[in-house]
Image: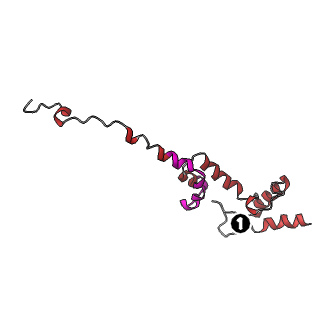
Amino acid sequence: MLSTWFYNRACVNIKIASPKARKDGRKRNWVSCTFARVVEELGLNEGITHPLDKVYFHTPRHTFGSWLAQNGTPIYTIAQLMGHKDLSMTQRYAHLVPDTMRAAAFSLSGALERKPAKVLPFSEASGIQSADG
């Protein structure tokens, strides 16, 4: 009985936002209920007490964004793939790519060590003979 109560309770208050979400704000419970049932049947949350460690309907979407960030996908591309309207939502994935920042900074390390190009006087560079020579 408790399991049935939990199952029904888990499916009641989940609102799904998507590009095709209903404009009247009605809930699409059948998707979230199916997800909750599968998570329960697979035992993905068994023995987990902390809410941040549990699997919820949003977990695969967050995993998608995290994996993109960890694989070096630019933050703007992640925002587009996830349908974020601005980069502020996508910034939560930026902490997963510290090596990208480091790599960008180190990419300039050899810039100052390059030998400067030989500068020729204007007459030599243009092939024009000067009046004195």
Relative to 66, residue 109 above or below:
above
Query: Magenta residues: mostly which secondary structure?
Result: helix
Camera-side residue of 76 and 72: 72
Name the amino acid type tagged 1. Lys
View extreme (front): residue:
113
Image position of 88 with respect to 60: above or below: below
Highlighted magenta segment, given as a residue range: 81-103
Q: Quadrant of the C terminus?
A: top left
Residue designated by label 1:
15
Q: Position of residue 129 (x, y in %)?
A: 12, 30
Q: Quadrant of residue 2?
A: bottom right
Report if residue 27 lies within the magenta region: no
Determine whether, in the image, residue 19 is placed left or right of residue 9: left
Q: Residue at x 60, y 52 (%)?
A: 96
Query: Relative to residue 113, is residue 82 drawn left or right?
Result: right
Label 1: state its secondary structure: loop
